[in-house]
Amino acid sequence: MSKNWYILHTYTGYEGKIERTIKSLIEKFSAGDKTGIDPEVVIDVKVPVEELVEIKDGKKRTRSNKFLPGYIMLEMDLPEIGWKDTCAKLYKIQGVTGFVGNISRSNRPMPITKDEAMNLLQKSGVIKGDKQVRVRQSFNVGDVVKIADGPFASFTGTVKEINMEKEKLSVEVQIFGRPTPVEVSFLQAEKA
């Protein structure tokens, strides 16, 4: 047996409830109730979320956002014999539809690769690394924006270019009656 990460497909919006249910079934088994889930088989449960930064009403707000809605990550050490019992208990949870990669419930679940698991865990900040805070971008070329922060604060201009990789906008503002392009980050601008 070896520990691997598996992806469990759920109804969208049920991820948190299913995570809590699985954790309570693990606690139930630890308390001596054999109807629960063995903590040596299901080791960890994660709903992958990322930090999303957005500007509303001139204020910077950070919120958690599920980047895989409808999916839960399970770290499991599935035994060769008896794996069906654990999977059957997971399938009985309301909102669970099955494992990703399984065509039928009679097949053994397929784990994701170590690289995929590391990538998902780093993106969600579970594993230290380059935790990415994503900026919610709702700008289009031609939009009129107000610069809320930086040396050009309170200037209004038109978006001429959007650089998604650098999370920057090229905004044309009027300085001394002349159109001047300035570069600002997504967090420094808001729609006018």
Image (tube, rainbow, N blue to C red):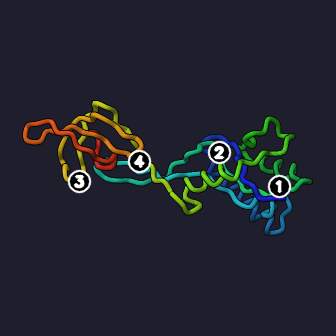
Circle 3 packing at 10 Å, graded few (<14), some (14-19), many (20+), is few
Q: Earlier in the sequence, mark 2 or mark 4?
A: 2
What's the amino acid at mark 2?
Answer: Tyr
- The location of residue 163, given as percent across then percent down, is 36, 40
On screen, residue 188 versus residue 70, left or right, reads left
- In depth, the one of 140 and 160 nearer the eye is 160
Q: Are marks 1 and 2 in contact (CB under 8 Å)?
A: no
Q: Residue at x 33, y 49 (%)?
A: 187
On screen, residue 132 versus residue 13, left or right, reads left
Which element carries disc 4, helix, strand or loop? strand
- In depth, the one of 118 and 96 nearer the eye is 118
Quadrant containing the C terminus is top left
Q: Which residue is mark 2?
A: 71
Q: Which mark is residue 135?
A: 4
Q: Residue at x 72, y 44 (%)?
A: 96
Q: Earlier in the sequence, mark 2 or mark 3?
A: 2
Q: Are marks 3 and 4 in contact (CB under 8 Å)?
A: no
Up/down of 94 relative to 77, above or below: above
- The location of residue 146, given as percent across then percent down, is 23, 42
Q: Which mark is residue 150?
A: 3
Circle 2 packing at 10 Å, graded few (<14), some (14-19), many (20+), is many
Q: Earlier in the sequence, mark 1 or mark 2?
A: 2
Q: CA distance from mark 1 to mark 2?
A: 19 Å
- The location of residue 166, given as percent across then percent down, is 38, 46
- Mark 2 vs mark 4: give the one in front: 4
Q: Earlier in the sequence, mark 3 or mark 4?
A: 4
Q: CA distance from mark 2 to mark 3?
A: 39 Å
Circle 4 packing at 10 Å, graded few (<14), some (14-19), many (20+), is some
